[in-house]
């Protein structure tokens, strides 16, 4: 009886250790998904966006200014820790946020909860999406491939904004 009790405790202990090891693996996987690339503050006609959340025809750009280091921090504060990119457009364009993109393309509420991508590239902060609607070709639900080396979501699908080809 004593050996059975000891064996049961030993097996339970192994089960606990296995769970702890699985937790560690998941934790390491989430660290690998973080993007180590600096993220500068991006302003387009004084509207904040991000480099991976901007849908704009490059031909509409009049001027680009890059501000680094202390100059960026002095002008824009902590948001510009990694620098700032200021983009001025040739003309005033009706740039919209994600809510307006969903409305224009009649994206169902259920699909609006999916992880967002532009041309298959993950948008880290969808609230920063800034788009010229004329540059969007379509929005589709896409499936993650089983063999995808880096997934940014645990969902099976993501919402992909497809932009028009640039001339």
Image (tube, rainbow, N blue to C red):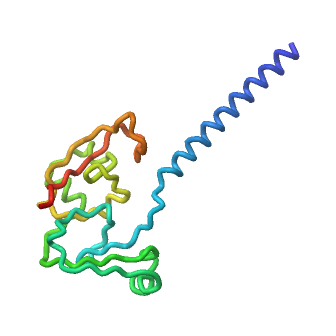
Q: How many marks?
A: 0
Question: Which of the 4 image quarters holds residue 60?
Answer: bottom left
Q: What residue do we see at 18% from left, 79% from top? A: 62
Q: What residue do we see at 44% from left, 63% from top? A: 37
Q: Position of residue 107 (x, y in %)?
A: 19, 47
Q: What residue do we see at 15% from left, 70% from top? A: 59
Of residue 113 and residue 34, the one placed in the foreground of this image is 34
Of residue 75 and residue 145, the one placed in the foreground of this image is 145
Q: In this view, which residue lies farthest toward the front?
A: 167
Q: Position of residue 131 (x, y in %)?
A: 21, 63
Question: Which of the 4 image quarters holds residue 92?
Answer: bottom left
Q: Is residue 136 left or right of residue 117?
A: left
Residue 55 versus residue 64 in the image, above or below = above
State which quarter of the image contains the N terminus. top right
Residue 51 versus residue 89 in the image, above or below = above
Q: Position of residue 103 (x, y in %)?
A: 17, 54
Residue 58 versus residue 28 in the image, above or below = below
Q: In this view, which residue lies farthest toward the top?
A: 1
Of residue 13 and residue 38, the one placed in the foreground of this image is 38
Q: In this view, which residue lies farthest toward the right?
A: 2
Q: Position of residue 89 (x, y in %)?
A: 18, 77
Question: Which of the 4 image quarters holds residue 74?
Answer: bottom left
Q: Is residue 82 left or right of residue 5?
A: left
Q: What residue do we see at 46% from left, 75% from top? A: 81
State which quarter of the image contains the C terminus. bottom left
């Amino acid at each position: 009886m004593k050996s059975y009790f000891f064996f049961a405790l030993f097996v339970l202990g192994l089960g606990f250790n296995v769970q702890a090891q699985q937790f560690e693996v998941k934790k390491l996987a989430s660290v690998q998904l973080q993007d180590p690339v600096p993220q500068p503050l991006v302003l387009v006609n004084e509207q904040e966006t991000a480099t991976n959340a901007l849908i704009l025809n490059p031909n509409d750009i009049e001027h680009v200014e890059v501000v680094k280091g202390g100059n960026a921090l002095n002008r824009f504060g902590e948001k510009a820790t990694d620098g700032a990119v200021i983009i001025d457009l040739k003309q005033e364009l009706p740039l919209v946020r994600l809510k307006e993109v969903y409305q224009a393309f009649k994206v169902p509420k259920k699909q609006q909860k999916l992880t967002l991508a532009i041309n298959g590239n993950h948008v880290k902060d969808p609230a920063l999406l800034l788009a010229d609607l004329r540059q969007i070709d379509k929005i589709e639900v896409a499936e993650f491939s089983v063999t995808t080396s880096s997934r940014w979501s645990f969902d099976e699908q993501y919402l992909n904004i497809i932009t028009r080809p640039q001339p």
